[in-house]
Image (cartoon, helix red, strand yellow):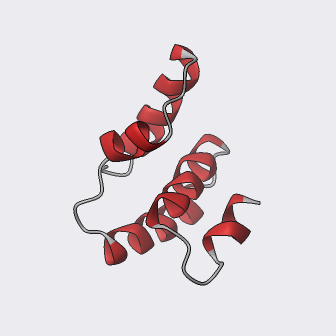
Amino acid sequence: MAERSALTPGAHYLVSMIVVSFATLAGQTERAERWAKDVRSRRADATRQMFLEAFPFKDPQWRARIDASLDAHGF
């Protein structure tokens, strides 16, 4: 679903970051890398902090997993 949303015309770059994170968590490294490139092509200064501010996960364990997944791709 996240990937389908990211493919929607005009989708926000943060939606692509959701795909990066979820693909990483699912062990789909190549897919995550493709989407990380998409994010960088659209917003070179994108950071995981920007993502976490936009999507303030309350559960600290889930937030840490998301943070680590984005960090693994240089965000």
Front-most of residues 21 and 6: 6
Total labels: the figure holds 0
Q: Is residue 61 left or right of residue 64?
A: right
Image quadrant assignment for residue 67: top left
Instruction: Name the residue: 56% across, 73% down.
Output: 11
Task: Say whether residue 67 is left or right of residue 58.
Answer: left
- Which residue corresponds to the image point at 55% horizontal and 20% vertical from the top-left? 58
Q: Percent position (x, y) of residue 55?
A: 50, 39
- Position in image of residue 63 (x %, y %): 50, 26
Name which quarter of the figure residue 28 lies in: bottom right
Residue 51 horizontal/vertical position (percent): 41, 45
The vertical placement of 43 against 48, above or below, is: below
Residue 39, percent across and down?
A: 40, 68
Q: Quadrant of residue 30?
A: bottom right
Seen at 31% across and 49% down, the residue is 75
Q: Which residue is found at the position 43% from the left and 63% from the top? A: 36
> From the image, which quarter does the N terminus lie in?
bottom right
Given the current orientation, which residue lies at the most extreme left position?
45
56, above or below 20, in the image: above
